[in-house]
Image (spheres, helix red, strand yellow):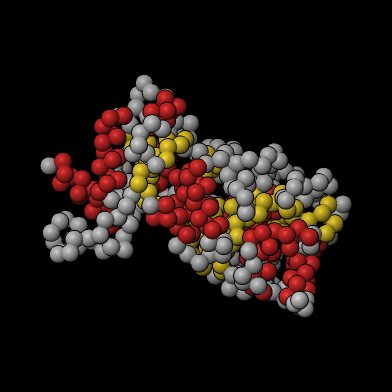
Amino acid sequence: MKHVVLLLLFATSLLGACAPLRPDPPASAADPAAANGNAVTAMNSARDIVLAVANPQDPPPTHAGSTLLGYIPTANYGAGQRALSALDAMRQRYGWREVTGWPIKALSVYCIVLEPPPGMTRDELLAVLAKDDRVALAQPLQDYSVYSQAPGNAHAYNDPYANLQRGFVETDAAVAHNVSQGDSVHIAIVDTGVDTSHPDLQGRIHDISNEVDGNAPAFNRDPHGTEVAGIIGAIGDNHLGIVGIAPRAIISVYKACWYPANSPDGAHCNTFTLAKALAAILDTDARVINLSLGGPPDPLLDRLLQQLLGQQRIVVAAMPPDGSHAGFPDSTPGVLVVRVSNASPAPAGVLSAPGNDILTTQPGGAYDFTSGSSMAAAHVSGIVALLLALSPHLKAHDMHDLLLRSSRMVGGAQQVDAAAAVSALGQVHSAPRR
């Protein structure tokens, strides 16, 4: 009977790629998003562990019907028999409670989020798991935050047109648009949800993916992702609002961050939701990935980021507000790290962009000022799209060097300049070959 149960679980996981092996609390099979949402709510970054085991997919039997799996398409990637057996044996040995589980095809592993058994601390269980040969990875479930500042008293600007598009004007994006508007460059925004019905974003969002829950109204009420999306791709020439840095780019939104109830600290993400978003992007043609968020180093997330970078994706990350430079994703070599421009010198290799008092889109068709390195990163993602539309084969290090050397002084602070970068790219392409 035990083997029959395992086979049924295997078949279920294959048919519902990211469904938990043993969801707790249970959710309706007709609503997988609800199961995912319940799992995210049940997670505790101060308690839980992310564990991965090898998940090779055996070829199907040559004659259909010889096992319960004979009718399952091979295209589905779920929990293989080896992964299920290993997890079940370890669960019985260590006594953990599984919160949720999901396959990561790019890494050939199956991951679970687990709660240590009563009487055992997370560190104690991690020490034991480190000695178990069946474990491919075991780490704490990490917590991440988006990088925006709480709204303050807005400065009473006397020139509304200048302040309306401060970052847009300071980076000379309008001049760059004479040459490029980011046509057809695919940008993946990993963030909170976005108000897809906003008049300045309506029709600009190509597709969305919710890795947190199935709450569509909450998705459209999320401010941080709406702010980032507006800076990158708000519609131009529509007689309202603002203009995005790359108004003709293709935008995909992956909700991996959410606003905890009754929390004043802004949106949060964790290893589970971010890993699902990054793994999903691996199956797309998105060339630019905007990560206006960050937190501690994370082995699983770093593996996925390395896969993306190895595929020549360009990852743009916000620098932490405290100026540190040692976490995810900002410490990974090859990532374009962006801070808010100011008079102090930037750390070596870090790009600077406008990030203070940026007017951008808000849920409900509104606009407001916001600040933070999240907004600075969004400006750079837009400029990257402008350049890729002109030179699709630019690599991350070439992009970084181009943006750094074409930066200019604005108000006593050096920062990226869209027009100068486009011009410099044109000069490189027009230079005679030797």
Image position of 156 (left or right of 142): right
Vertical side of 233 occupied by 305: above or below: above
- Give percent across and percent down for residue 87: 30, 40
Q: Nearer the viewer, residue 351 or 134?
A: 134
Quadrant occupied by the C terminus: bottom right
Image position of 9 (left or right of 216): left
Quadrant occupied by the N terminus: top left
Vertical side of 418 occupied by 83: above or below: above
Count of picture labels: 0
Please identify the quarter of the rendering in which residue 96 is found: top left
Image position of 242 (left or right of 112): right
Vertical side of 11 occupied by 5: above or below: above
**Which residue appears farthest toward the top when viewing the image?**
119
**Which residue appears farthest toward the front when viewing the image?**
434
Residue drawn where x is 73% and y is 63% of the image: 402
Q: Is residue 371 visible?
A: no
Q: Is residue 4 visible?
A: yes
Residue drawn where x is 33% and y is 57% of the image: 77
Residue drawn where x is 47% and y is 64% of the image: 284
**Which residue appears farthest toward the right when viewing the image?**
412
- Give percent across and percent down for residue 285: 50, 67
Please identify the quarter of the rendering in which residue 392 is found: bottom right
Image position of 283 (left or right of 313): left
- Give percent across and percent down for residue 374: 65, 50
- Give percent across and percent down for residue 428: 75, 72
Residue drawn where x is 18% and y is 61% of the image: 61
Q: Nearer the viewer, residue 88 or 129?
A: 129
